[in-house]
Image (cartoon, rainbow, N blue to C red):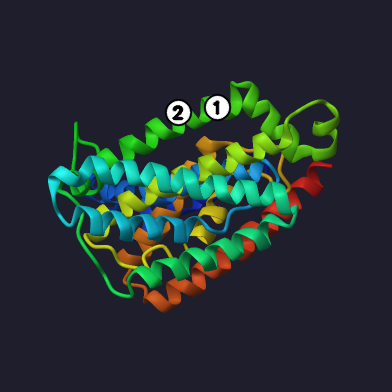
């Protein structure tokens, strides 16, 4: 099979939708899929940069949750607090991402272990702040997550803009070239004069910003600051990145394909809901998908060699 795994998964899903769910292709349902996919798509954009660098960020789900809880409490449904909440989102997302990047550069430990520790810390901070739902989004954030403009969800338009900017950064800038070089062979990148620590720091900052924006959208979807909202999203983001063909070993990847994979995963959830599959069975299916895509990520580089 050539091409990223997402192509084949999408073909199978579309065939199943035609056979089992003719109502799946209604404009309302497709718009709903786009809304559902927007949060994961933003997380996948940031995660792509980190994985291309040969690293991983498991903290993004809880970072999105912390942003969700704090901004919900700050806004508490007030329109005039929207700008302050957006500022907090950017500052917190970039700040935590930068902290993770600096720790990675200073400690030189496996990013999987480091970001698992950050996940636990962020979860603890969230529950220290509150152990129950707090606040509410402002009308603008609710519209961003659930509204419509020119027949399209504004949340998905945000994803398209972010995807375009990220694609340019990854494939048409010196930073993108350096990022791929670091992921491909970090020692060779150092010998070539690339500022590896700066590149890694920038990748984690982008991941943090993406998680912050995802948290803001998730708040608009849920309508309250629920402290368990982002649990498991980091795993979904990694699955989307691998499904999109990004190599877990680093060195290559595509933001566009990662976003497409996030949409396909949204299609899977939507189809299972329409088929009235129980939430517990959905967990089993999701676990199976995780195993399959990780195997694909390992097998494809071997086949290429």
Quadrant of the image containing the N terminus: top right
Q: Position of residue 59 (x, y in %)?
A: 53, 58
Residue at point 57%, 58% (across, down):
58
Q: How many marks?
A: 2
In the image, residue 275 above or below residue 178: below
Toward the viewer: 278 or 256?
A: 256
Relative to 202, is 182 on the left or the right?
Answer: right
Q: Which mark sits nearer the N-terminus, 2 or 1?
A: 2
Q: Position of residue 40 (x, y in %)?
A: 43, 51
Relative to 128, is 169 on the left or the right?
Answer: right
Regarding mark 1 in the picture, which secondary structure is present there? helix
Q: CA distance from mark 2 to mark 1?
A: 9 Å
Q: Which of the labelled discs sits on residue 30, or is there none?
A: none
In the image, residue 126 above or below residue 169: below
Q: Position of residue 57 (x, y in %)?
A: 59, 53
Residue at point 21%, 59% (across, down):
223
Q: Which residue is mark 2?
A: 164
Q: Position of residue 255 (x, y in %)?
A: 53, 37
Q: Which residue is mark 1?
A: 169
Q: Is residue 11 visible?
A: no
């Amino acid at each position: 099979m050539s091409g990223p795994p997402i192509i084949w998964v999408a073909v199978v899903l579309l065939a199943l939708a035609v056979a089992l769910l003719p109502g799946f292709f209604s404009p309302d349902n497709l718009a709903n899929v786009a809304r559902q996919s927007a949060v994961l798509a933003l997380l996948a954009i940031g995660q792509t940069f980190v994985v291309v660098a040969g690293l991983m960020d498991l903290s993004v789900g809880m970072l999105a949750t912390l942003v969700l809880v704090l901004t919900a409490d700050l806004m508490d449904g007030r329109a005039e607090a929207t700008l302050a909440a957006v500022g907090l989102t950017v500052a917190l997302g970039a700040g935590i991402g930068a902290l993770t990047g600096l720790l990675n550069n200073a400690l030189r430990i496996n990013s999987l272990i480091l970001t698992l520790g950050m996940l636990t810390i962020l979860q603890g901070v969230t529950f220290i702040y509150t152990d129950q739902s707090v606040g509410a989004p402002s009308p603008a954030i609710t519209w961003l997550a659930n509204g419509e403009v020119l027949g399209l969800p504004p949340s998905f338009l945000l994803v398209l803009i972010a995807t375009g900017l990220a694609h340019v950064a990854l494939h048409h800038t010196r930073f993108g070239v350096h990022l791929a070089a670091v992921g491909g062979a970090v020692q060779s990148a150092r010998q070539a004069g690339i500022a590896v620590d700066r590149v890694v720091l920038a990748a984690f900052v982008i991941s943090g910003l993406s998680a912050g924006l995802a948290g803001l959208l998730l708040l608009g979807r849920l309508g309250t600051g629920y402290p368990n909202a982002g649990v498991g999203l980091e795993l979904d983001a990694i699955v989307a990145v691998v499904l999109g063909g990004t190599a877990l070993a680093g060195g290559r990847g595509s933001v566009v394909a990662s976003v497409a994979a996030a949409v396909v995963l949204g299609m899977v959830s939507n189809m299972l809901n329409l088929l009235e599959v129980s939430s517990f069975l959905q967990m089993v299916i999701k676990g199976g998908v995780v195993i399959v895509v990780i195997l694909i990520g390992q097998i494809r580089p071997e086949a290429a060699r």
